[in-house]
Amino acid sequence: MTEFDLRLRAVVPAPVKVTYEALTDPAALRAWLAEHAEVDLPGTYTFWGRYAPDGAEPHQRVLHADEHTIRLAWTLGGVETTAQFELEEDEDGTLVTLSQSDLPSFEEVLSDRAGARGELQTFWTLSIANLADYLAGRTLTPKCDYTSRELRASIVIDAAPDDVFDSMTRAEHFRRWSGVNIDIEPYVGGRFAMGGFELNPGGAKFVEFDPGRGATIEFADGMTERWELEGTGGRTRLTVMHSGFDPENPPYPGWAGWLSGSAALRRYHELPVWRSIWREMHIAGIPEGMFTFDA
């Protein structure tokens, strides 16, 4: 039996049959998952291109497929991994469980020694977030371009800049929409600590903090993340950019994580009856207490 290092569970707003079609129709996959896709089950299920880790060419083969499960072998950096989708009926649509084997250790990811396999966790969180919005007929979040050295993206949120800014800089709001445990000191020089101060006492630091307009966070390695908010007609254009990193080794795992977070932030502000799509995020090696989702 395959031992999975990653398990993501999310509810998407469509019946199982419709969700399965979104998972197996090449045109749908090209919308929410990857630049290129070919599917002809039970023999073929491949995706590749700039929006997939190690995506210069397809590296997947089908291990199993039925009306509720798709299991793939996916070779990245010379290592064969297993990715699996499982679909179950849920009162709000379909419960999607994504499992992934052969992830590198948390320490390898943090030290940038993990290669393409280190990009899988946030690749899948962003992909499932886009699957949920695709099925809801909502605008999709920009994908991570694993060939680009420019990490910059803009999204439009149907909420005022002050409200969006507070959601990004007040820990009680950030925890609710993101599902990530975090502590934030909302001022210049204040800490921004993913995992909370207990797990991450130093955190990153705010080097700019302009309520309703923007902020810049500087990390210990010198990388910065800049948020710019521009309001018009009660809506906000949020632009996020990373800089100060080694251009030969862009921090794609973190960048895709921020993009998937942007999808959650939009839903938080725009859905009249909001509930996170996520039901569980289990990642082997991640310190306990990082996520606040219920199992």
Image: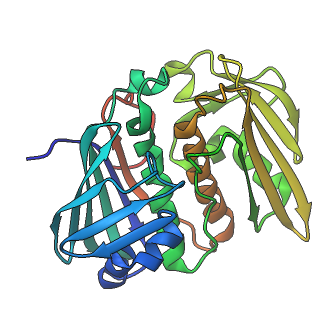
The part of the image, by quadrant, that contains residue 222 is top right
Counting every numbered tag in the picture gives 0
Task: Say if residue 276 shows up in the picture.
Answer: no
- Left or right of 284? Residue 246 is right
How far from the left and from the top, in percent, is residue 266? 66, 62
- Left or right of 168? Residue 28 is left
Query: Is 108 above or below relative to 276?
Result: above
Query: Is 233 above or below relative to 204?
Result: below
Query: Is 188 above or below relative to 6?
Result: above
- Residue at image position (43%, 45%) is 54
Can you name the residue that lies furthest to the left here?
1
How far from the left and from the top, in percent, is residue 241? 74, 42
In this rendered view, identify the residue nearer to me: 51 or 138.
51
How far from the left and from the top, in percent, is residue 127? 47, 59
Can you name the residue that lies furthest to the front here?
57
- Left or right of 293? Residue 169 is right
Task: Say if residue 181 shows up in the picture.
Answer: yes
In this rendered view, identify the residue nearer to me: 292 or 140.
140
In this rendered view, identify the residue nearer to me: 82 or 181.
82
- Residue at image position (58%, 72%) is 273
Query: Is 2 above or below relative to 98?
Result: above
The part of the image, by quadrant, that contains residue 163 is bottom right
- Residue at image position (55%, 27%) is 196
Question: What kind of colouring is applied to the model shown?
Answer: rainbow
How far from the left and from the top, in percent, is residue 53? 45, 47
